[in-house]
Amino acid sequence: MFKRKALEKLKYWKEKKAPKYAALLEGARRVGKSTIAEEFAKQEYRTYIKVDFANITRDILDLFDDIANLDIFFLRLQMSMGVKLHRRESVIIFDEIQLRPKVRQAVKYLVADGRYDYIETGSLLSIKKNVRDIVIPSEEMRIQIYPMDYEEFMWAIGNDTYSVLRDLYKLGKPIGNSLNRKQMRDFRIYMAVGGMPQAVEAYVEGRTFTEIDEVKREIINLYKDDFFKIDGTGLIGRMYDSVPAQLATDKRSYVISAATGKKKIDRDLERLHDLLDSKTVLSCHNVFNPGIALPQTKDNDTFKLYLADTGLFTTIIFNSSGKTDEDIYKKLLSDSLPADLGYLYENAVAQIIAGSDRDLYYHTWEKENSSHYYEIDFLLASKTKIVPIEVKSSGIGKHESITVFQKKYSQYAANGILLSQKDINSVGMLKLYPIYMLPFIVEEL
């Protein structure tokens, strides 16, 4: 198994929250929830039982029909699974808990019993059919599982220089053109592969990018199958597919009708919420007034969508032929593709910010005497200040929006940050960083 940061979050849960709370690992399909849960159980407990509700026999499933007498239930479960449980030294994993809502509801009583710990894993947890007619237990500590971030990716490929990169960032000095180019190429490899564990495993095994792309397409098709089970029109899948295209056309916000090809109806909003509940996309909301706490001034009706995994994003934008040629990936890694891929780098930034458990925000406002508008790609809160972030795919180009923003909101705005492929530098109140240093910036806020 790959080293995952979520294991540290589970340690916090075990030390501070258990046994009064179950741990609920939620996230998109194939991000590694089940693997993380089982690895943690092996490391931290004397014994464990894993009940996989996606692959379960009728005999074991029948055990959950009656848990009124927990003494009998636990004895039957141990006999059926062939594992002896030990009071306060064992954990029970309920894998794919969304498939058995009644079992999830019973977690309240299992936790109250207190003799064992419980870890639940699930995707599509809030979909209407998965919560209908049940009381969602309040005794759950939710832990969001994201695709592997850049540091986890470097661990996986055996590159242990991430901490050195952090030290270079703290110096605040340019690292040099040659080293920066190498680091940017390494980061583009991460953008090409992404953070889905199966794709990372394929890369570690030395598979070609075309073969890795096939792994990612299988994941995308799995998502679309899930969407179709939720809504047989196929429109949720079209909403998912349209995310890169809408970012590429530089739309001010995500437009549902542009994805569905039809006039928006109330049911489309339900489809959108189902898409968001799948955790396969990230929502980034416009804010009316960046001078106020960002959550209090967000516009619920104006938002952008990003894909939760930039590797899947890369696959979709090169999807015209049904498979991605190896040459395209070679050109991507060498930064020699003719197309402007600013929206790809923007998605990578969104993934980094969201992976730090931060909500995503941006800000637009009209230019005076013009039909055009200014836009700040991302806003981050830092104590009493707001940090504006702009993303460029190559050079630093013009950065009019962030300059105007800092003047307009000088009372609230910290130094702006421009992320690109260029080395560390500064221009007035604007700090320039290569995109791979964003995780360190977020750590400091």
Image (cartoon, rainbow, N blue to C red):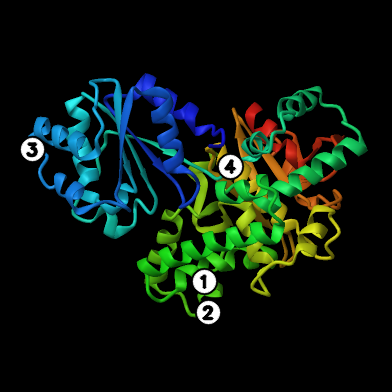
Inter-mark Cα distance, 4 to 1: 25 Å
Q: CA distance from mark 2 to mark 1?
A: 9 Å
Corner quadrant of residue 306: bottom right
Q: Earlier in the sequence, mark 1 or mark 3?
A: 3
- Disc 2 vs disc 3: which is toward the camera? 3
Q: Is residue 10 above or below residue 101?
A: above
Considering only vertical position in the picture, is 152 above or below 219?
A: above
C-alpha separation, residue under disc 4 versus residue under disc 2:
33 Å
Q: Residue 397: horizontal and vertical position, in percent?
A: 86, 52
Q: Is residue 407 visible?
A: yes
Please tell me whether mark 3 sits on a helix, a strand or a loop. Answer: loop
Q: In 3D space, how far apart are the residues under numbered discs 1 and 3 (Cα atoms)?
A: 45 Å
Residue 40: percent from left, percent from top: 43, 30
Question: Tag 2 or tag 4, which sits nearer the N-term?
Answer: 4
Residue receiving disc 3: 68
**What kind of residue is marked 4?**
Met
What numbered label is drawn on residue 433? none
**SS label for mark 4:** loop
Q: Residue tagged by mark 4?
A: 148
Q: According to the image, label 2 marks what residue?
A: 261
Please report the residue visible at 52 percent of the width from the left and 59 percent of the height from the top: 219
- Identify which residue is drawn at 56% across, 36% down: 2
Q: Between marks 2 and 3, how big is the CA–CA gap? A: 51 Å
Return the disc, 4 or 1, that comes first in the chain's sequence. Answer: 4
Q: CA distance from mark 3 to mark 4?
A: 40 Å
Residue 75 in the image: above or below residue 231: above
Do callouts 4 and 2 mark residues in contact (Cβ within 8 Å)? no
Mark 4 nearby-residue class (10 Å; few <14, some 14–19, many ≥20): many
N-terminal label among 2 and 3:
3
Looking at the image, residue 33 sits to the left or right of residue 342; the answer is left
